[in-house]
Image (tube, grey):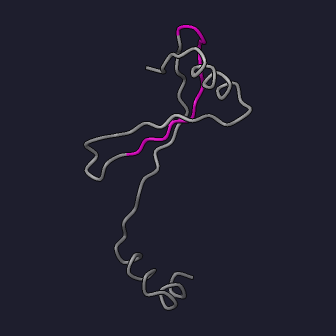
Amino acid sequence: MIEQLRLRSEEFATLWDLHEVGLKQQSRKTIVHAELGEIELDCQELQTENLAQSLLVFTATPGTEGYERRALLAVIGRSLA
């Protein structure tokens, strides 16, 4: 399969030969808020190439309790920090 792709696409062959692999760091986190209590969120970690900096992105699936509690934060004006 890979050889077929390499033959059909010069761009694919070039990218494949580079062997650049990105790691996706994703997990579940529980944030404890003073007024709302525990909020379970999905956390994705994005890192710079040299790993010197990270950005944590917190999301929640619509319809979940975590989603509803996170939406409440906008109403009560409190951050997760």
Q: Quadrant of residue 59?
A: top right
Q: Quadrant of residue 42?
A: top right
Q: Nearer the viewer, residue 49 or 4?
A: 49
Prevailing SS of the magenta stretch: strand
Horizontal relation, residue 76 to residue 10: left or right = right
- Image x and y of residue 10, in percent: 43, 87
Q: Residue at x 52, y 21 (%)?
A: 31
Q: Residue at x 51, y 16 (%)?
A: 78
Horizontal relation, residue 18 to residue 50: left or right = right
- 13 up-or-down from 39: above or below: below
Bounds of the magenta segment: 34-46
- 9 up-or-down from 49: above or below: below
Q: Residue at x 60, y 25 (%)?
A: 70
- Quarter of the rendering occupied by the C terminus: top left
Single out the residue that lies furthest toward the bottom. 7
Q: Nearer the viewer, residue 66 or 22?
A: 66
- Quarter of the rendering occupied by the N terminus: bottom right
Q: Nearer the viewer, residue 39 or 78?
A: 78
Number of numbered callouts drawn: 0
Q: Is residue 44 magenta?
A: yes
- Image x and y of residue 41, in percent: 58, 30
- 34 up-or-down from 74: above or below: above
- Image x and y of residue 66, in percent: 64, 26
Single out the residue that lies furthest toward the right. 63
Q: Is residue 35 magenta?
A: yes
Q: Residue at x 38, y 81 (%)?
A: 14
- Image x and y of residue 25, in percent: 46, 45
